[in-house]
């Protein structure tokens, strides 16, 4: 036996062999893992970059002088395409502010001066009339009889508002109602909640008697059947009376403000319906229709060369020229004279379906 021969017993040799195999196996696993994360075709500079990226950066408050810059591979972030806000915005606007279904929008609109409670109450100038709640019951009956969807109300005072809400049982939304300036309720817009939903609402200021400012409503409603958004604006321009004097000047200013507001809504792409007691006949008509952008529900010319309709009162319904009016009615029949000293005025309206997006 050579002196270099292994003097360990068989069991010791077997244990050493097993240990060697285990070490080799572990090394194989390590190599495999490294191969996954460090492909064989990587360049030396790539490997160096990995090392560089794991090095701790020098603290900013170190007192030693600047060191030589280290060469590092900057890893680029994934490319994210910028969002095209303009196109997305326009698409959403068309979906929410214009017709998205290809069906026309049909509704019945009214303007109704319901004779304010202050006129028929103590100290008022309309003695002998029924109380405001009683007269509002007649007014509500008229709205139901004619199946009105949205109405501009004038001289709609607080007690009349409360009576209206109580009698309609939540079937109608009202703005402004009693939601803000206590004067605002007098010129409110009401709509059937099974036909329209409120999108937004605000008021604008116009001059009334002697130029004192009062709010009138501008309401954006969405038709539940078509998805069409329509703006409704309702006004009561100041009358010339023995008590309050000549308010021609303030009517002119009020009408100019209302036209400017309509222009703003048209510029934003919305159809507009304007209701109200303008306390003017041909003058109100000519001003509202002169540009060709608005038409009267009871007919007449559109654009320059004013030709008013043959039958006019001070209560008007105007609409954007894209709105088709039909079935105009101004009446004092039935219980209307028991509700108010004004006629009940209404018209059917139709906005044709717009083409789908992308056409």
Image: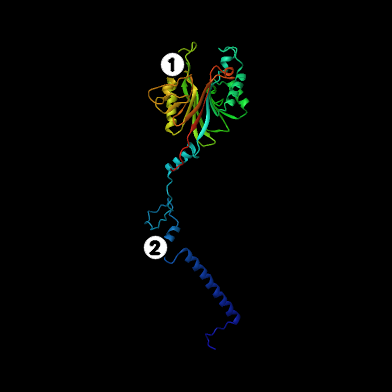
- For label 2, the crowd category at 10 Å Cα-Cα, with few meaning under 14, some 14 to 19 and many 20 or more, is few
Q: Where is residue 122 in the image (x, y as percent from the top left)?
A: 59, 13
> Looking at the image, which residue is at 60% across and 30% down?
171
Q: Which mark is residue 76?
A: none
> Residue 14, how many percent across, how many down?
58, 79
- In depth, the one of 317 and 274 nearer the eye is 317
> Residue 31, how many percent across, how many down?
49, 68
Asked which secondary structure carries label 1, the reply is helix
Image quadrant containing the N terminus:
bottom right
Q: Position of residue 35 (x, y in %)?
A: 47, 66
Number of residue marks: 2
> Which residue is outermost to the top?
242
Q: Mark 1 points at which residue?
A: 248
Q: How crowded is mark 1: few (under 14 residues within 10 Å), some or many (20 or more)?
A: some
At 59% from the left and 17% from the top, the residue drawn is 338
Alpha carbon distance from label 1 to label 2: 87 Å
Decide if residue 267 is on the left or right side of residue 118. left
Q: Which residue is drawn at 48% across and 65% down?
A: 36
Q: Mark 2 points at which residue?
A: 45
Q: Is mark 2 on a helix, strand or loop?
A: helix
- Which quarter shows the C terminus? top left
On the question of residue 235 being in view, the answer is no
């Amino acid at each position: 036996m050579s002196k270099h021969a292994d003097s360990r017993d068989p069991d010791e040799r077997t244990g050493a062999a097993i240990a060697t195999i285990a070490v080799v196996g572990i090394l194989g696993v390590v190599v495999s893992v490294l191969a996954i994360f460090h492909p064989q075709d990587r360049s030396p500079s790539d490997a160096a970059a990995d090392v560089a990226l794991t090095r701790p950066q020098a603290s900013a408050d170190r007192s030693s002088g600047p060191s030589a810059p280290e060469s590092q591979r900057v890893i680029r972030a994934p490319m994210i395409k910028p969002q095209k806000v303009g196109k997305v915005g326009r698409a959403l606007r068309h979906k929410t502010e214009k017709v998205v279904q290809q069906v026309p929008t049909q509704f019945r609109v009214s303007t109704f001066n319901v004779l304010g409670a202050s006129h028929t109450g103590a100290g008022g100038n309309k003695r002998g009339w029924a109380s405001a709640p009683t007269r509002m019951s007649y007014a509500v009956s008229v709205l139901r009889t004619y199946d009105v969807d949205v109405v501009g109300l004038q001289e709609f005072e607080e007690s009349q508002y409360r009576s209206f809400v109580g009698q309609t049982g939540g079937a109608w939304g009202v703005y402004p109602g009693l939601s803000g300036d206590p004067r605002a309720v007098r010129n409110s817009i009401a709509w059937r909640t099974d036909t329209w939903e409120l999108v937004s609402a605000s008021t604008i200021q116009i001059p009334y008697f002697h130029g004192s400012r009062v709010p009138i409503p501008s309401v954006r409603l969405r038709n539940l059947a078509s998805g069409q958004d329509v703006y409704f604006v309702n006004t009561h321009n100041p009358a010339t009376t023995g008590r309050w004097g000549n308010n021609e000047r303030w009517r002119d200013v009020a009408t100019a403000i209302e036209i400017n507001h309509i222009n703003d809504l048209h510029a934003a792409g919305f159809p507009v319906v304007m209701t109200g007691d303008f306390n003017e006949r041909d003058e109100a008509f000519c001003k509202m229709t002169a540009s060709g952008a608005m038409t009267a529900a009871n007919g007449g010319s559109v654009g320059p060369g004013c030709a008013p309709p043959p039958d006019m009162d001070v209560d008007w319904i105007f609409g954007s020229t894209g709105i088709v009016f039909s079935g105009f009615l101004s009446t004092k029949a039935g219980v209307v004279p028991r509700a108010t000293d004004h006629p009940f005025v209404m018209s059917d309206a139709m906005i044709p379906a717009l083409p789908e997006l992308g056409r």
